[in-house]
């Protein structure tokens, strides 16, 4: 007698496939379609976030996303790239990667790009124009879909969608995400003047930073408005391109060497403020009892300094997110989202322990 064979029906095969998908290799769209009773096309539209998915009820979309998670569904990146004619890759240009400004902007960019299924190449150029030009050409050769440039002036006209963050120069076809510099400076100086400070020293940014000149013009405007006279002897500029506390430390030393009294110091960024506080302490000055210090950016370490740093907060992660979202809109060319020339974000003053009213007697000349 021939051995009997068990008949495997269609539902048994589906169950086996489902079990494997739940605990093993990622499921296919066909598996999700069989499980949900929906067409492959509808599921694909929802998971890929195409505009046509808006016509699908939210409850159905929620079911699709839940099933995709349950069955460990992962879209085929290569197939999606070929289908949409995109590489799903973006280039990001940054002066350097260190604690502070660029790192926080990058965190927002990364979050925004990953939500849209993009990855990015990161290139540091250290403010060298030849490296910026070379990086721009290299990214175009790598077929990236767009470029985000942080604190960087693009030397070449880009045929790719391009977004800049904190670029003072308007560039044709480029959307710029920037801080309201005038309002930011007003917050800092109004705070110091409100405490009673009149002799205020300034540490300017490096000459190559795109924020330096607009910030300085904003300082001059705010000082004039508050009837504060800026003493040239109390203005020092950061020197060197080291992404460390040293430039702020040496700038503060030069201010102290000018032998000109001051009761408050407004610095270009938090990193330089931390270096400046070290120099003030070495000179026998207390912060804030002898000299109040205000930083700029609100990096993560600002709240953990001793004393904690009063600073002007830039919404850096938000700026990065806005840059990523604006770039994806340009890449996908949604008619509902025409390119903007400039997106301005507002700052916030964070008052901590490094500022207080000036001493009753001005600091004597050392």
Image: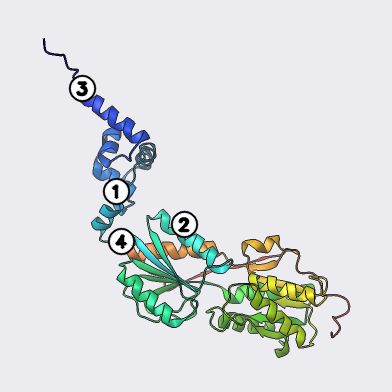
Marks 3 and 2, how far apart at CA = 46 Å
Place of residue 264 in the rendered image (x, y in percent of width and height, measured from the top left): 76, 77
Sequence-wise, which precedes: disc 1 or disc 2?
1
Q: Distance between the residues labelled 1 and 4?
A: 19 Å
Q: In this view, does 204 lie to the left or right of 324?
A: right
Q: How far apart are marks 1 and 2 (CA)?
A: 22 Å
Q: Which of marks 2 and 4 is in front?
A: 4
Quarter location, residue 207: bottom right
Q: As drawn, which residue projects farthest toward the left?
A: 1
Res 325 quadrant in image: bottom left
Label placed on residue 87:
4
Q: Mark 1 points at which residue?
A: 45
Q: Mark 2 and mark 4 in contact? Answer it, CB < 8 Å.
A: no
Name which of mark 3 and mark 1 comes first in the sequence.
3
Mark 3 sits on what residue? 8
Proximity of marks 1 and 2: CB atoms separated by less than 8 Å: no
Q: Name the residue under label 2.
A: 111
Alpha carbons under labels 3 and 1: distance apart:
33 Å
Q: How far apart are marks 2 and 4 (CA)?
A: 18 Å
Question: Against 44, is 149 above or below?
Answer: below
Query: Which residue in the rendered view is the most extreme toward the right?
Result: 361
Check disc 2: other Cα within 10 Å, few if <14, some if 14-19, many if 20+. some
Residue farthest toward the top in the current orientation of the protein: 1
Front of the two marks 3 and 1: 3
Asked whether the viewer can see residue 335, the reply is: no
Residue at figure coordinates x 71%, y 66% from the top left = 309
Checking the image for residue 17, the label placed there is none
């Amino acid at each position: 007698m021939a051995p009997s064979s068990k008949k495997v029906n269609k539902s048994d095969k589906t169950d086996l496939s489902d079990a494997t998908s739940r605990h093993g290799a990622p499921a296919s769209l066909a598996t999700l379609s069989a499980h949900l009773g929906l067409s492959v096309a509808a599921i694909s539209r929802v998971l890929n976030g195409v505009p046509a998915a808006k016509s699908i009820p939210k409850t159905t979309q929620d079911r699709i996303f839940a099933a995709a998670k349950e069955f460990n569904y992962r879209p085929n990146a290569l197939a999606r790239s070929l289908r949409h004619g995109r590489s799903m890759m973006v280039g990001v240009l940054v002066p350097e990667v260190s604690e502070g400004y660029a790192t926080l902007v990058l965190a927002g960019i990364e979050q925004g790009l990953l939500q849209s299924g993009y990855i990015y190449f990161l290139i540091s150029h250290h403010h060298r124009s030849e490296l910026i030009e070379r990086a721009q050409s290299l990214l175009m050769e790598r077929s990236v879909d767009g470029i985000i440039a942080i604190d960087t002036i693009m030397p070449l006209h880009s045929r790719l969608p391009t977004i800049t963050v904190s670029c003072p120069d308007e560039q044709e076809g480029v959307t710029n995400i920037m801080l309201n510099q005038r309002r930011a400076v007003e917050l800092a100086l109004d705070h110091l003047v409100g405490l009673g400070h009149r002799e205020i020293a300034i540490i300017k940014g490096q000459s190559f930073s795109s924020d330096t000149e607009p910030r300085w013009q904003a300082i001059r405007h705010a000082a004039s408005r508050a009837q504060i006279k800026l003493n040239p002897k109390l203005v020092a500029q950061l020197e060197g391109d080291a992404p460390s506390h040293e430039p702020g430390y040496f700038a503060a030393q030069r201010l102290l060497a000018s032998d000109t009294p001051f009761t408050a110091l407004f610095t270009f960024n938090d990193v330089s403020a931390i270096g400046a506080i070290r120099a003030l302490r070495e000179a026998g000055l207390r912060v804030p009892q002898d000299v109040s210090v205000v930083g700029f950016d609100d990096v993560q370490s600002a709240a953990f300094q001793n004393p904690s740093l009063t600073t002007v907060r830039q919404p850096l992660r938000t700026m990065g997110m806005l840059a990523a979202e604006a770039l994806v809109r340009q890449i996908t060319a949604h008619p509902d989202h025409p390119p903007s020339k400039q997106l301005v974000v507002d700052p916030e003053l964070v008052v901590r322990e490094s500022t207080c009213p000036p001493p009753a007697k001005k600091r004597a000349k050392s």
